Amino acid sequence: MGKQMTEMLKGTLEGIVLAILSVRPAYGYEITARLREQGFSDIAEGTVYALLIRIEQRGLVGVEKIPSEMGPPRKVYSLNAQGHEYLEEFWRTWSFLAEQLEQLHEEGK
Amino acid sequence: MGKQMTEMLKGTLEGIVLAILSVRPAYGYEITARLREQGFSDIAEGTVYALLIRIEQRGLVGVEKIPSEMGPPRKVYSLNAQGHEYLEEFWRTWSFLAEQLEQLHEEGK
DNA sequence: TACCAGTACATAGTATTACTGAATAGTGCC
DNA sequence: GGCACTATTCAGTAATACTATGTACTGGTA
């Protein structure tokens, strides 16, 4: 992955993961796999797990340990009320930024 | 400014400044003022100056010292060929990210 | 003259976040 | 037993924006 993408993900990856969780609960391994399928070619696994622990400690998600048939138990995360609120705020911030950048992009043509 | 915005700017602020310079050359104080007018309410001056030095050292911009009538001389930065190329790459990265996020936002509704 | 506001740039130290590169563990198949 | 796949965790590093200053030049004013 390019360095630009790496830096751009700081601050957005968290929102991306919360958005994924807002659709339905998921666990780390699954989230990483889905991100990779979607073109975030090599987001490190460690990055996602660290992020999940962070948002858990901030009280944005609930966790449930569910046994897996294929390996160690999964930690399934789901967005709680506070998480939804935080995600709303994320979308507002993102929209503002996207709008400003869109404008700049137009100007530069 | 919110903490979310702060984190989101990592990786994008550089692109934003390069985009501003691609329209026409500018100096630090001017760029800071313009950003603030555009709603990036309190981007620290130090941040912009540090960024300008960074992109200069990476060879993305040219610098010219021009005397000011109102204070110390201005360091006017302008995008060079390499900078334009880098900016192109930035837009590609941004577009990809924006598309993915747009999709996620739709799904979450 | 002394002081202040506005213009303009610079820097030391801090916080956050994603990465690399491991290690640990459970299950099923050869 | 060893390998592949699933699944989580952690120590150390790099990049970038922030805070909080400090420096310096000009013009106006009391």
Image (spheres, coloured by chain):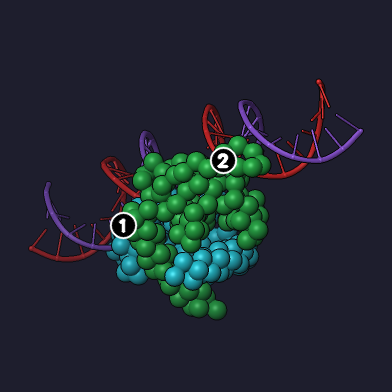
Chain colours: A cyan, B green, C red, D purple
- Measured as percent of width and height from the top left, residue A10 is found at 46, 54
Task: Indicate left or right for C8 with B92 as reference.
Answer: right
Subunit ID for the residue under disc 2: B
Q: Position of residue B69 (x, y in %)?
A: 64, 42
Pointers 1 and 2 in contact (CB under 8 A)? no
Image position, residue A42 (x, y; %): 31, 58
Residue matched to label 1: A1
Task: Report whether residue A63 is seen.
Answer: no
**Chain name for mark 1:** A
- SS assignment at label 2: loop
Closest to the observer, A23 or A86 = A86
Which residue: 53% across, 43% down? Answer: B66
Question: Amino acid type of disc 2?
Answer: Pro
User: Which amino acid, mark 1?
Assistant: Met
Q: Residue at 49% across / 71% down in the picture?
A: A106
From the image, tell me which residue sits under label 2.
Answer: B67
Secondary structure under badge 1? loop
